[in-house]
Image: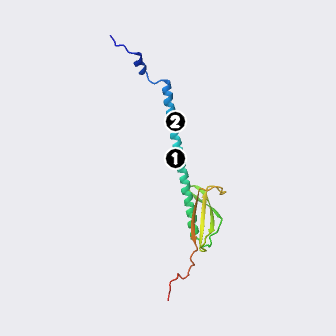
Amino acid sequence: MKPAVSFKSMASSRGMTLLEVMIALFVFALAGTAVMKAASSHLNSISQIEDITFATWVASNRLNQLKLDDTWPPKNDQKGSMEMAERTWYWQQKVEKTNDDTLRQVEITVGLDELYSSSVTSVKTFVTKPAQRGANSGADNG
């Protein structure tokens, strides 16, 4: 004779109920949403870091051009553009006097907007008056 199988053991071997399946799907949906939000935020951060890096390079290039120029004092309120990374970057140059007459503070602001309404980054440096060409270096030649 076969042993009697109880109704309780039969019910537990049938699988998950509809409610359990719906709860599991809800948990997976929440986890998927959190993963997508984190990935989106990460990609947005990478894009911002890339923009700041390129804008800083544009500002550095402009400051190097300024240091190679012998014009004193540097011209204030200059604007221009530069191609980098298949985009056009727009820069603005602001020059401020310092307490030292042979020193100027130069700020280069860089952005992607031609109207200069917003900027990606700003770089400041100090520029000294260029040495006179052919001037005596102070050494005594006698």
> Looking at the image, which is closer to me, 17 or 130?
17
In percent of width and height, residue 55 lies at 57, 58
Mark 2 Cα shell of 10 Å, populated few (<14), some (14-19), many (≥20) = few
Image quadrant where one finds the N terminus: top left
Secondary structure category for the residue under label 2: helix
In the rendered view, would you say 13 is above or below 42? above
Which residue in the protein does label 2 denote?
A: 30
Tell me the mark number nearer the camera, choosing from 1 and 2.
2
Q: Quadrant of residue 56?
A: bottom right
Which residue is painted at 55% across and 57% down in the image?
54
Which residue is painted at 53% across and 42% down in the image?
37
Which residue in the protein does label 1 denote?
A: 42
Q: Quadrant of residue 77?
A: bottom right
Question: Upstream in the sequence, badge 1 or badge 2?
Answer: 2
In the rendered view, would you say 47 is above or below 58? above
Observer able to see residue 33: yes
> Looking at the image, which is closer to me, 84 or 95?
95
In the rendered view, would you say 18 is above or below 106? above
Q: Disc 1 versus disc 2: distance between alpha carbons?
A: 18 Å
Amino acid tagged 1: His
Residue at the outermost right position: 115
